[in-house]
Amino acid sequence: MVWLQHYDPLGMRWLSTAMAALPVLVLLGLVAMGHVRAWVAALAGLGAALAVAIFGFGMPLPAATGSALYGAAYGVFPIGWIVINVLFLHSLTVQSGRFNALRSRLSQLAPDPRVQLILVAYSFGGFIEGSAGFGAPVAITAAMLMQLGFAPVRASVMALIANTAPVAFGSVGIPITTLAQVTGLDVLELSRMAGRQLPPFSLMIPFWIVLAYGGWKALGGVWPAALAAGGSFALVQFLVSNFHGPWLVDTAAGLASILSLVLLLRWWRPTDGWVAPGEEGKPEVAPTTTVVAGTAAGKAAVVGAVEGERVGTRSVGNPWMPWLILAGVLFVWGLPVVKKGFDAIYAPGVPVAGLHERVMRVAPVVEGVGTPEKAEFRFNALSATGTGILIAAVLAGMSMGFGPREMIRAYGKTALRVRGSLVTIAAMLALGNVTKFSGADATLGLALAGTGPMYPFFGTLLGWLGVALTGSDTASNVLFGGLQKITSQQLGLNPYLMCAANSVGGVMGKMIDAQSIVVAGVATGVQGREGQILRAVFWHSVALASLVGLLVTAMAMAEAR
């Protein structure tokens, strides 16, 4: 028997909306308080979501529990699979001394921490987003920033804010291609529209992160670097999205941004004598270093890397090599032909009992008669991004001189360190899935959709809400893409404008979604301080999402003339 979603179960729209928002408020409230561990807050939010789904929306118990298990499984694979393998690679680079050597190289190339922030968090992070996504850019860049001397929480915050400009196109264009699939709109036209909305913010973000880091005085000395990185990223983002498509946007834009900044640094350096605030200007040893390289040999690795010597029988070598291997493998792994080839070999889909084709969305969320929602857990172990990262880590480990036993030992220590965070991520994703399948997400979306003439602004915030809830721009497009199309057509708006706005507005919610915050906390070793990270990024997220909403509103008004 199929259960039909009901978007106003209490008979009063405002009351139903308040009830639908309760799990999110519980989760974010507990995290923001800072006195509750993330996994406790996640489980509390999940409990609230199940209570709201079963007793508030009348969702059958098997469907509710099935949606929670489905989300938890997705949290472990592929999300947790990405996190553990990225940190495994990071631990190998720390133990070999490559990470500290990379810090030394970056300090020579860009000794100013403001330029390091732009180069690593924004330019390199955008390049990684184009290949991997799913939290990998935040994990990698946050860890790198910390090794460059940024305090752990500040490194997390900067990585989260920087990981906004590339997210609308994401890994090989998946958010846009998925949006086209769920709405029936042309993928190239959606790419063009998103490529007109996003570049102003891609130009803005490098300036924004420097302002967030050190204020106007800090920005005054490095605005050429921010302009070079943001301008080149925005220009290439516009050109590729409008004249090629969504697939290579972030890879090309990130690479252009890196090269532009490196070329600029050949003849320009900051000369204002600005000093980093607090202790962020001082190098610090990362918590991950003490875990992975806590032995005498590990300490020798750190010392040897800093002094440029051989570490044991291992030469430090090229510190960029592990990350170049990672970028190369992920680029190949992200190609559609490669993914399809691997999936043809092994990608079993397991229908979720009690949920698969047992829930149906109805009007006005879908047009006409809906179809039962599919819920199949796909164990695409070969094509998964995390598998590509693991292979890259093994190849990098071999290139650094590690043997099988050493790598297995390092992997075991990494898994032990992130076990609690994997529970948190699984609970977060379970909460998001329960919210989706119960229809609570649509209730929240319809509240924003009912804003009439202000819909271009609030419709953009709907995408922001979707990413904040699910942790994925792709998932937000799946949740609200159809609703954006239907509502915009009813209001006489361009459906391409609002569907693209769902993806572009969504990127500003990426920095406050619980999954990203947990990933950043794990990468920098500050588990338990997620509330501090959330408080630091929240108003940046709101402000940037509002600016996107204003831009989309202006574009809608221009089209109406």
Image: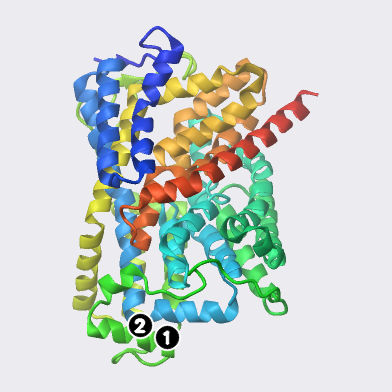
Residue assigned mark 2: 302
Position of residue 136 relative to residue 57, above or below, is below
- Near mark 1 (Cα within 10 A), the count class, few <14, some 14-19 or many ≥20, is some
Task: Give the label on residue 553, or none.
Answer: none
Task: Name the quarter where the N terminus is drawn.
Answer: top left
Q: Nearer the viewer, residue 182 or 45?
A: 45
14 in relation to 259, above or below: above
The structure residue drawn at horizontal position 34% and vertical position 58%, both measured from the top left corner, is: 526
| Secondary structure type for disc 2 | helix
Label 1: which secondary element: helix
Residue 437, given in percent of the width and then of the height, sits at: 33, 26
Snapshot colouring: rainbow
Q: Is residue 351 visible?
A: no
> In the image, what residue occupies the spot 63% across and 29% down?
457
Residue furthest toward the front? 278
**Which is more toward the observer, 320 or 343?**
320
User: x, y percentage for residue 516?
Assistant: 41, 49
Q: Are marks 2 and 1 in contact (CB under 8 Å)?
A: yes
Task: Name the residue: 29% across, 91% down.
Answer: 312
Disc 2: CA contacts within 10 A as few (<14), some (14-19) or many (>=20): many
Tell me how far mark 2 sits from mark 1, CA to CA: 6 Å
How many numbered markers are drawn? 2
Q: Position of residue 21 (x, y in %)?
A: 40, 26
Please tell me which residue is depicted at 36% across the width and 10% down the height of the picture: 10
Residue ranking furthest to the right: 561
Q: Position of residue 71 (x, y in %)?
A: 29, 38
Viewed as shown, does residue 166 lie left or right of 22? right
Left or right, residue 457 beside residue 290: right
Type of amino acid at the residue the image marks with label 1: Val
Which part of the image, by quadrant, shows the C terminus? Answer: top right
Whether 166 is drawn above or below 186: the answer is: below
Residue that label 1 marks: 306
